[in-house]
Image (cartoon, rainbow, N blue to C red):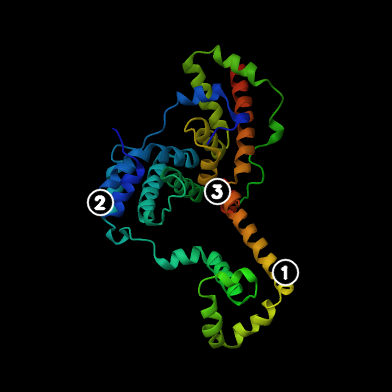
Amino acid sequence: MKFQDDSEYIRRVLSGDVAAYASLVAKHKNLVFSIVLKIVNNREDAEEISQDVFLKAYQSLNTFERKSKFSTWLYRIAYNAAISKTRKKRVEMVAIEETIITNYSTDQIGRNMNELEENDRQLILEKALLRLPKKDNLLITLFYKNENSIEDISDITGLSVSNVKVRLHRIRKKLYEEMNGLIKRN
Amino acid sequence: MEKEDFLSDDLLKDLFRNQSWESPGDGFTGNVMKQILQAPEVAPVKKPFYLILRSSWLYVLLFLVSVLFLMTSDLPFTDYIPGKEYFTKNLLPYLGSLLSGFKPLVSNIKTIMIPLMVILAGSLLVGFDHFLFRKPNIRHQTTH
C-alpha cells in the first residue's frame, strides 16, 4: 500500500476526517509495535500499549507542533508509554557495564561474520541484540535499521544528543563483543 | 542529518537491513479506529491561546521589558521609535509612580548600560540554550 505524506493525513484528521487517521495507523503500526515490543518484551502487552499510543497520539494531534517529524513525535509517545509500563524505581546509572567491553578488532569480527551464511548471520545478530539491555537494543535498531538520525533518537528517547552518541558508540562495541562470543561458540 | 562518521558501519547496516519489523495482529488498525470512534469527545481542536502564551511567557516578558526600557530611556536612537513621543508625553504620566520610578533609573546613559547588558546577555543565553542545547529528560533515566 502506498502512503501519502504524514502532513496530509494530519491536515485531514484535524479538518474532521477521522477516517484519515487509519492510514497513519497503518503506516506506522509496525515500527510503533516493534519499539514497544523491544522494551516490554511481551506481544500482548505491546499490542495493547501500541493501541493506547495511537489513541493518545490522536487525542494530542492538535498539540503536535511540527517541529519534528510526525513519526519522531509518535515514536516518542510509544517509547514513553513502553517505559512507563516497565518503570521500576532503580535509577539507571550506567547503561552498559564497561568492564565487559574488551579489546577486539571489529574488522576481524566483520570478516568472521561475512564467512557465515546469511541465516546464521541474522541469527547471531538477533541473539546478540537480545543480550543487550532493552533500551540499548532499541537505540541501535533505530539508528542502523530505521536510519534515524542522532537528533531523532534524542527526540524519541529524551536523551541528550551527546548522550545518544556516547551510548550508540558503546552499544555498537557491546554488540560486536556479543557477536564475537556467539561466533566463537558456533 | 548525516550519520556520525564514528558510528558508520556497513556491516551492521547490512545486517539490520535484512531484519524485519515486528507486526501487530491483523485487526490492529480496526481496533484503534474503533477506540477512537468511541471517544468522540476527544476530537481534535485547535491549540488554545493560553497554551501558546504559557509556553512562550519568557519571550513575552522579555519583549515587554524591552519595550518598557526603550520607551522610557533617553538613548538617542530610541527617539526614532514610532509612538515614543506620544507614549512619553501622553501615556507615561498616567502610568503613575511605577513607570515614573523607571525614568530616573534610565535617564542616564551610564546607569542604563548595566541593565541593558544584563538584558542582552540574558536574552542571548536563553536563546542559545533554547536553540542549541537539549536538556536531558530525567524521566527517562529509569530502567528495568
Percent coordinates x, y for residue A127 in the rendering = 53, 26
The answer for which chain carries disc 2 is A
B5 lies left or right of A80 = right
Picture quadrant where residue B45 is located: bottom left
Image quadrant for the C terminus of chain A? top right
Query: What number of labels is visible?
Result: 3
Image quadrant for the N terminus of chain A? top left
- Report how far apart the C-alphas of labels 2 and 3 lie in the structure: 31 Å
Secondary structure type for disc 1: helix
Tell me which label, 2 or 3, sits earlier in the chain. Answer: 2
In terms of depth relative to the viewer, which is nearer, B12 or A65? Answer: A65
Give above or below for A18 relative to A40. below
Task: Say which residue appears at 35% left-offset and 52% top-offset.
Answer: A58
Give the residue number, with chain letter if any, for mark 1.
B114
Q: Of the numbered discs in the image, which one, if any, rests on residue A158?
A: 3
In terms of depth relative to the viewer, which is nearer, A38 or B9? Answer: B9
Give the residue number, with chain letter if any, for mark 2.
A17
Task: Say which residue appears at 56% left-offset and 87% top-offset.
Answer: B93
Name which residue type carries label 2.
Asp
Picture quadrant where residue B37 is located: bottom left
Please tell me whether mark 1 or mark 2 is closer to you in this view.
1
- The reply to whether callout 2 and callout 3 are in contact (CB within 8 Å) is no
Name which residue type carries label 1.
Ile
Category of crowding for the residue at label 2, using alpha-carbon neighbours closer than 10 angstroms: few (below 14), some (14–19), many (at least 20): few
Category of crowding for the residue at label 3, using alpha-carbon neighbours closer than 10 angstroms: few (below 14), some (14–19), many (at least 20): many
Please tell me whether mark 2 or mark 3 is closer to you in this view.
2
Q: Is residue B65 visible?
A: no
Percent coordinates x, y for residue A15 in the rendering = 28, 54
Name which residue type carries label 3.
Gly
Task: Say which residue appears at 51% left-offset and 26% top-offset.
Answer: A126
